Amino acid sequence: MMKDTVHLHDKTFRVMIPAAEIDRAVTAVAERINTDYRAKSVPLFIGVLNGSFMFLSDLMKKIDFDCELSFVKLSSYSGTATTGQVRSLIGLNNSIEGRDVIIVEDIVDTGESIEHMVRDLESRKPASISVCTLFFKPASYSKQIPIQYRALEIGNEFIVGYGLDYNQLGRNLKDVYVVTE
Ligand code: 5GP
Ligand code: MG
């Protein structure tokens, strides 16, 4: 059952994107990745924890080529505003040299995190890198890194659900909610 509003900590959120619409967007992006990567040799999906876990789980079920999966962590967010500092990448133990890598993010906002991530991965000599994000905020993005796969584009509002949190709450919601004033 979908609730119209949810309360997390001190804030109220209302439904913005129902699960069915998210599913359609995930399917569309998976089909594009299938087309682009089917002929490549065992691409590697790298999911950025924690926010991407639900998206990546649904995305992978729609991928029809042999692939590998790994998770990394890179945290830069606390509360509803970017803290500005980006921590280093942890969790990548195996070499990615010569691999076709698809980074899977929950949301690309200013692009600070993804730029840091791409630069780090580039230094490890993969064959290629592309970025797949569930949400993209075009009005906020200020970097040059190409974001090839954007499932959904939104404004500068703060959202939760489907893996995304507000101070760790809300990740379990299957619909996406937007904060109310
Ligand atoms: P960026 O470095 O692109 O500014 O921010 C990327 C990170 O900020 C995302 O991976 C996510 O963790 C967090 N973030 C940005 N916008 C939102 C939002 O609307 N909701 C939530 N829950 N997190 C966000
Ligand atoms: Mg993130």
Image: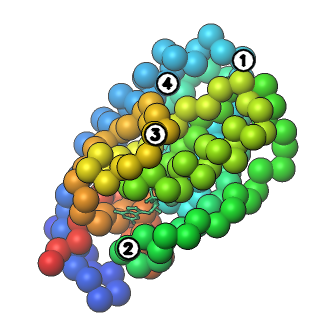
Query: Measured from the top left, where is residue 155 in percent x and y?
Result: 22, 54
Q: Is residue 53 visible?
A: no
Query: Where is residue 69 drawn, in percent x and y?
Result: 68, 40
Q: Nearer the viewer, mark 3 or mark 2?
A: 3
> Which residue sits at x=65%, y=26%?
128
Q: CA distance from mark 3 to mark 2?
A: 22 Å
Q: CA distance from mark 4 to mark 2?
A: 31 Å
Tell me the CA gap for discs 1 and 3.
27 Å
Say which element carries label 2.
strand
* Marks 4, 2: nearer the viewer: 2
* Real-space Cα separation, disc 4 to disc 3, in angstroms: 21 Å
> Residue under circle 2?
81
Residue at the far top: name it. Answer: 39
Q: Which mark is residue 41?
A: 1
Residues at circles 4 and 2 in contact by the CB criterion of under 8 Å: no
Nearer-N-terminus badge (1/3): 1
Q: Are marks 1 and 3 in contact (CB under 8 Å)?
A: no
In the image, residue 143 lies at what x, y percent? Answer: 44, 46
Q: Which mark is residue 33?
A: 4
**Figure quadrant of the C terminus:** bottom left
**Residue flagged by tag 3: what amino acid is it?**
Gln
Mark 4 or mark 2: whose residue is earlier in sequence: 4
* Amino acid type indicated by mark 4: Ile
Label 3 element class: loop
Could you tell me the amino acid type at mark 1? Ser
Which mark is in front, 4 or 3? Answer: 3
Disc 1 on helix, strand or loop?
Answer: loop
The N terminus lies in quadrant: bottom left
Q: Residues within 10 Å of mark 3 (few under 14, many from 20)?
A: few
Q: Which mark is residue 144?
A: 3
Can residue 104 be spotted in the picture? yes
Q: Which mark's residue is nearer the viewer, 1 or 2?
A: 2
